[in-house]
Structure formats: structure tokens, C-alpha cells
Image: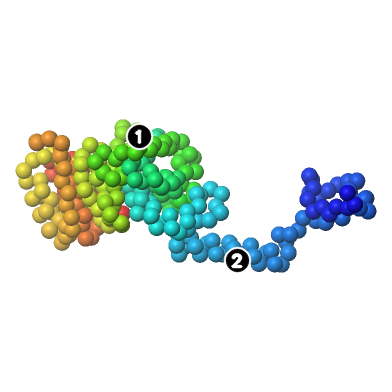
Amino acid sequence: MAGAALDAFTKEPPEPDNPLLALDEVICTPHLRAATVDAQVNVTVQAAGQVVDYLKKGIINNALNVPSISAELLAEVRPYFELAERLGSFQAQIYAKGLQTVTIEYAGDVTEHPTGPLTMALLKGLLSPIVGPLVNYVNAPHFARERGIRVVEARSSTAEGFANMIRLTVTGNEGQRSVSGALFAENDYRIVRVDDYQVEAVPQGNLLVLHNDDQPGVIGFLGQALADAQINIAMMNLSRRKIQGRAISLINVDSPVPEAVLERLRANPHILSAVQVHL
């Protein structure tokens, strides 16, 4: 070998007594490619472009702690992405006491896509009502680990009567609760199960969730209480396991329900719980 040019060494910078520095046949230069003016401009432009892509298109590129998603794939998974985050938020506002384990089951068509970003979105939705606005898609798994919450993912090719389904099951100090959602069409996703109750509710806006005895007059009382408060019902979904047993009601309303109205509902002996959820 007649000569060599080096700009990288085992130790940076090299020791003064490194024998390579004394050889006339070897040219040693600092490893400064990234420090040139052109390199700094290019890196700055690239970073700014990636930020713009995320803020305007939701595309994440070259991140160390978040899976990269192309624009084409993002268009396909965005409805699942939004459904996952809203399932997490719904569950957190209904039940999030002393979370120990979070199990996320993906079934049907959704398993054809990467589920890593969906899990991050679900955890963001689940932890935001608990931790606050500091939670984002990147750090949500970190906050879960920090709180000792075990996160489990499962996948299945079948979705129990649906083309696709995402089921979130949480285990906490007071037992186990679950909520499931499905995508019916583009941008048409719904909550299809709460625990063992089959429902069909749009997870959007103000949602009133009631657990009640399956008794005549409960729905009439609910309607009158909301009417007296000038709260309009947009959609209502009722479900029960058996006649005269326990039932659940998911009611989409056009405006927030004041605490005084919630207290009036809870005062009814046949209404076991009344919780307002904002999605």
C-alpha cells in the first residue's frame, strides 16, 4: 500500500503518540464531515422536513423510538390508529384504578398492518387522563413501564363476527374491565363491546355511560333529566345480558352533562353508576 487517508480512529481524537500520525504515507484528518457548513444545512433541512411531515401528515421517519409509517400505509391505518387511542381514553375515564396489566388484542383485518404504532396510540389514550398532557405517542410506553404496568399484545386472524376488532382489557385494583372496537367502513369506527355487553356506539364527543337495573322507567327518567337540563340526545345504545338483570346505556349527547345532572341520575336507585366520557 503506497498510502492511506484516515478520518476515523478507535479513539477520537487519536493519542499524540499514535504511530499513524508519524507516517509520511498516512494522511490523518479529523472526522468533521457533519461539521461542515453544507452538512449542517442539509441536516437542518432534513430535520425540519421530518417535523413538518409529522405535524401536517402524521408521517414519522427515522425515529429511534417510534415505528416509521409511510404516507400510503398511514392512510390505511389512520382509522385504526384513531380507534385505538379512543378505546384507551374511554377505558381510562371509565376504569383506571391501580392499573397492573394492559392486554391489547388485535383480530381480523387489522393484523395485516403493523400494530406497534396502534399500541402506542392506545397507551397514549389510556394514560393521558391519568398522567396529563405530557403523554405523547413516543413516551407513552415509557410512562407505562415507569408505573409498573405490564403491556401484553395478542393477535388473531378471526374477530368474533367482525371483519376486524381491537380489544383492550385492563386489570387493576378492582378487577378486570374491557372495551372492544371495530372499523365498519373508512373513518366509521365504533365501540362494539363493553365488558360482556354488546353495544354499538360512536366514540366521539360527549358520551354518557350508565350502568343500571333493567327496570321500566329508567330510560324515561334519563330522558326527562337530560331534557330538563336542555341536553339533546344524539344517539342512544342500550344493552343487557338478561331480562330484569343489569344493563348498560351509552348515550351520545350534544353538550357536556353538568355535575348536578349526573348527581340527579346517580340518586335514582336503579341507576348504579353514571360517568361522563369526553372523546
Where does the C terminus fall, quadrant-wise?
bottom left
Which one is in front, 108 or 171?
108
State left or right for residue 132 relative to residue 32: left
Residue neighbourhood size for the residue with mark 1, other residues' Cα within 10 Å, grouped as few (<14), some (14–19), many (≥20): many
Residue marked by disc 1 = 171
178 left or right of 142 in image: left
Percent position of residue 13, x then y: 81, 50
User: Crowding near pointer 2: few (<14 within 10 Å), some, many (20+)?
Assistant: few
Mark 1 or mark 2, earlier in chain: 2
Seen as rendered, the residue at the extreme left is 216
Label 1: which secondary element: strand
Closer to the camera: disc 1 or disc 2?
2
Q: Look at mark 2 in the image and give the residue it sits on.
A: 45
Question: Looking at numbered disc 1 in the image, what kind of residue is underneath it?
Answer: Thr
Q: Nearer the viewer, residue 67 or 141?
A: 67
Q: Marks 1/2: CA distance? A: 45 Å
User: Which residue shows up at 17% across the image and 49% down it?
Assistant: 237
